[in-house]
């Protein structure tokens, strides 16, 4: 199913599973929910609108010791939004310990 309503975020905090999470500042304290909090295949969307691209927010995993984000280039524990353009990213959980980045 599609994510719910758009949730604006400023000041950091935990991103919400099943929602459209709109980052509106450059805070580095945004965290994904634990990958185990969702079922395999559940996802969330993190977006940064054009008017906020001058900020570089960072989204990290809940527990860097046990969780990872899988991308085309390998694995990581954080995603930094750059200042080039607005973007939406989709992160899908395996229901255990991994988030897969699917732009």
Image (cartoon, rainbow, N blue to C red):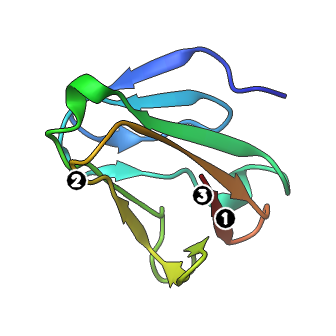
Image quarter of residue 48:
top left
Q: Is residue 34 visible?
A: yes
Q: Mark 2 or 3, which is nearer the eye?
A: 2
Give the residue drawn at x 36%, y 36%: 86
Q: Between residues 34 and 46, which one lies in front from this camera angle?
A: 46
Asked if 98 appears above or below 103 in the picture, the reply is below
The local secondary structure at tag 2 comes to loop
Residue under label 1: 100
- The CA distance from mark 2 to mark 1 is 20 Å
Task: Work out how far the residue at label 2 is from the one at label 3, CA to CA, in angstroms.
Answer: 17 Å
Q: Secondary structure at mark 1?
A: strand
Mark 3 element type: loop
Image coordinates of residue 83 in percent, x first then y, are: 21, 48
Q: Which residue carries the number 3 mark?
A: 34
- Which quadrant, please, contains the N terminus? top right
Residue 65: numbered disc: none
């Amino acid at each position: 199913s599609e994510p719910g309503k758009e949730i604006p975020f400023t000041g950091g905090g935990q991103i919400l599973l099943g929602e459209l999470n709109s980052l509106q500042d450059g805070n580095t304290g945004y965290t994904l929910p634990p990958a185990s909090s969702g079922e395999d295949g559940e996802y969330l969307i993190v977006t940064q609108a054009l008017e906020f691209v001058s900020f570089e927010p960072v989204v990290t995993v809940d527990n860097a010791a046990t969780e990872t984000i899988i991308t085309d280039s390998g694995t990581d524990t954080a995603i930094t939004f750059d200042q080039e353009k607005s973007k939406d990213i989709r992160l899908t959980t395996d229901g255990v310990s991994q988030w897969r980045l699917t732009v």
